[in-house]
Image (spheres, rainbow, N blue to C red):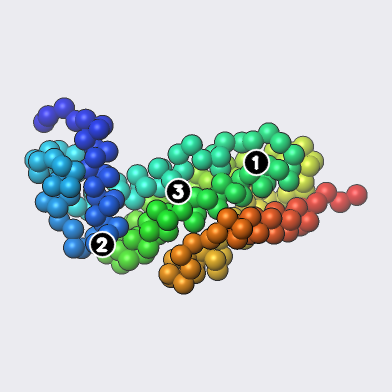
Amino acid sequence: MARLSDDKREAILAAAVRMFSEHGYSKVTMTDIAEGAPVSKPTLYNYFADKQSLFGAVVEHQCRTLLADRATLKRPRQGVREELTRLAESFVDVLYDPASVQLFRLVISEQAAFPELGQMVVASGAEPVLRSVAAALRDMDQSRALAIDDPDQSARLLLGMLSGDEHLRCLAGVKAGLSRKEKKHLVENAVEFFLRAHAVKG
């Protein structure tokens, strides 16, 4: 087998992301992707055994790309409100990114044929964010800045407030996305509610 190149793999994934997003899984062939990369079909099959494995790699690649270098995974050392606001802003930026919305739509549209894709999105995207936020909340509890009995559950609640029906509207195409003002309003309300719910008593 020829030596595999990271650049060629990235080119294949980029072409696959573009084509799957534009045309859906079923209408795209491996030949289409090879031509879009562009690489030869034998080269494409050196990297991915079939279209299903390529599609799985696309989902994982998109999750990691959307989270790369995001502040959600970088722990700012600031006041509690400022840290929560920064974490919330980063999560909202990722969640409502057009590429992220398109990825969710693509996974949902192909979920019946590939039920493992949902777990892939959770493992590659949702769980790293959840762990990062829960770790920040755990530190806040230990420093007595906030009273958080269950950091994992509280992280889920915070992230849930930032998605909810607004994200559903975007997925359904009712809204094209959130404006900067809408994002700011969403983050401020969620952080304020969270701080009040987890205030240290006494």
Q: Is residue 194 left or right of residue 99?
A: right
Disc 1 and disc 3: Cα gap in Å?
18 Å
Residue 188 appears left or right of 124: right
Query: Height in image: 25 above or below 3?
Result: below
The residue to which callout 2 is attached is: 24
Secondary structure of the residue carrying numbered label 2: loop
Mark 1 lies on residue:
136
Which residue, as the protein is rendered here, is positioned at the far right? 202
Residue type beneath disc 3: Gly
On-image quarter of the N terminus: top left
- Please rate how many residues cluster around mark 2, counting C-alpha atoms within 10 Å: few if below 14, some from 14 to 19, many from 20: some
| Residue type pointed to by label 1 | Ala
Of mark 3 and mark 2, the one earlier in the sequence is: 2
Q: Label 1: state its secondary structure.
A: helix
**Left or right, 85 with reference to 66:** right
x then y, percent, for residue 4: 19, 30
Q: Which residue is at 22% across, 43% downward?
A: 12
- Residue underneath mark 3: 125
Q: Is residue 150 above or below residue 139?
A: below
Q: Are the residues flagged by discs 3 and 2 in contact, CB closer than 8 Å?
A: no
Give 137 or 103, whichever is nearer the viewer: 103
Residue drawn 75% across the image and 53% down it = 195
Counting from the top left corner in percent of width and height, residue 102 is at 38, 59
Residue 146 locus on image (x, y percent): 77, 46
N-terminal-most mark, 1 or 3:
3
Q: CA distance from mark 3 to mark 2?
A: 21 Å
